[in-house]
Amino acid sequence: MRLSPRLGIPRPWLATAGPSGMLTAVLGGGLGCGPTVSLDDPSPVTANPTTSPDSFGPTSGQDGSDGASEGLDEGTRLDLAPLKLDVAPDVPLPPGVCPPDCQFELNLAWTYDGFDPSALLDPEDQVIVQVERDDHVVVAEERQGAITLARLDVGGQELWTLPLSLPCEPCRLVDLRLHPSGDLLLSVRGVDGMGSPVTVAARVELGAPTLLWSSAIALANGAGVAPRTGTLLAHDESLLLQPAIEGSMTPGLEQLELLAYDAATGDSTATTPIAVSTATGDAPIPRAVYDADGLLVLTHPAWSDDGGLSGEVRWLSAPDGDAVATSTRVEPPLRLAADSGGRVVTLGQTIGADQSLLRLGSGHAGDPEQWTLTYAVDTVTSSLPDLRVDSYGDAHVVIRTAQGMPGRESDVELLVLRWSDEGTLVWKLALPLPFDRVDEPISLQLTTGEDLVLGGFMTGVRHVERRVPNCDCG
């Protein structure tokens, strides 16, 4: 019998599921239910708690070490062989923790692989997945400057593929989002026929499929500025917004702006200035999401007072761009996600020779720095992680890891981690998935039932799989 680790609901259709990633660490916590338990080595984790699917606009919807594992509440027994967590009958199970005598696992529901291409991979090539509201999956593959879409049904079967003809060459994927209609919104960067940097927005109707429109906007260069744009997202049915960084009239300074598009035609309708600051070169792109209160949340790189490159989080009223609150992050945020309770979670990264430090932060406009944490991941090659937040407010992070030495990797795995809405590590699993080494090797999405959909390249071919959290109760 297999049970949902959240609610203990039988899911017999998973009885014959395929390979699973087994639990390597379990921690309780989250949502104020049950005990907080740590089985992990505490040294990689430092936290300072002071206490998804896509978000649309307002019309819809210092590090300090804790030094040791926290103790067990009365009525809780910890059994290390195998890993289990027993709680008193009247205490709810912590999110992600299985009942007694059950083993947590991530079962393989299905896999999908694209065609075997002749073109080799560039470091900038990537695969991005987007889960639709009916759990169909859109797969965007960028290979050597060309972008192809594929759509999968809920069982992972390919429905169609669509090569996109966009006004850029090469074209580099930035992000995918959904319009309230269900259409796909793409953010792409590249250069135009004159060799000038452009940002390209596009809208694709997924049923047909049809490229409804694509729109290119030239971006201004500047000394020390690499012009770039981020997430294209829907403010409402008729208006799309996108953060941008481009050069200013003053050498050495860059402008943070908010671009606006007509959602029906793709025409540029406005550019709203947000801030002017010292140029940040080719630092990470700006990201944007709407929180549950209808505020537009932007992240972007910024220089700190001590001269280091850090990050800022801005809560804005949209579409006018008026500032509501700001916060700083140790590193420029690479990823940004919102939960249904009004919080946003940021994910940054500090790269070392044999470690990658994941830096998460959580907050909302009323408390921009609710908690921050740092988690060390052992890996000899650097790659960007990905982040999603589920309906319970838990943050899911995936990162490709490798041992050995750069250029001669061994033991390539995918590390999957989950933190509660209070910043407590719930579990982590190392899956033996040798995704190819590119700059952004892994894309993560969550289904409506909060299964994990993973996408990337494997042996040069686009690879997508869906994994289901389960409690194996024998």
Image (cartoon, rainbow, N blue to C red):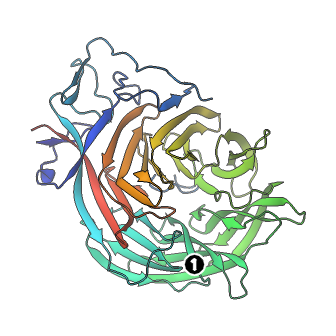
What residue appears at the point 11 percent right and 50 percent down from the top-left corner? 15
What residue appears at the point 28 percent right and 33 percent down from the top-left corner? 97
Q: How many marks?
A: 1
Left or right position of 143 against 169:
left
Residue 291 drawn above or below residue 141: above
For this orientation, the residue located farthest to the top is: 74
Choose between 141 and 430: the one closer to the eye. 430
Q: Quadrant of the N terminus?
A: top left
Q: To which residue does mark 1 refer?
A: 171
Choose between 419 and 281: the one closer to the eye. 281
Q: Is residue 433 visible?
A: yes
Q: Position of residue 469 (x, y in %)?
A: 27, 46
Q: Quadrant of the C terminus?
A: top left
Choose between 87 and 309: the one closer to the eye. 309
Left or right position of 245 against 15:
right
Among the 4 quarters of the image, the one containing residue 71? top left
- The amino acid beneath tag 1 is Cys
Q: Position of residue 461 (x, y in %)?
A: 35, 73
For this orientation, the residue located farthest to the right is: 250
Among the 4 quarters of the image, the one containing residue 359? top right
What residue appears at the point 53 percent right and 29 percent down from the top-left corner? 47
Q: Position of residue 12 (x, y in %)?
A: 12, 49
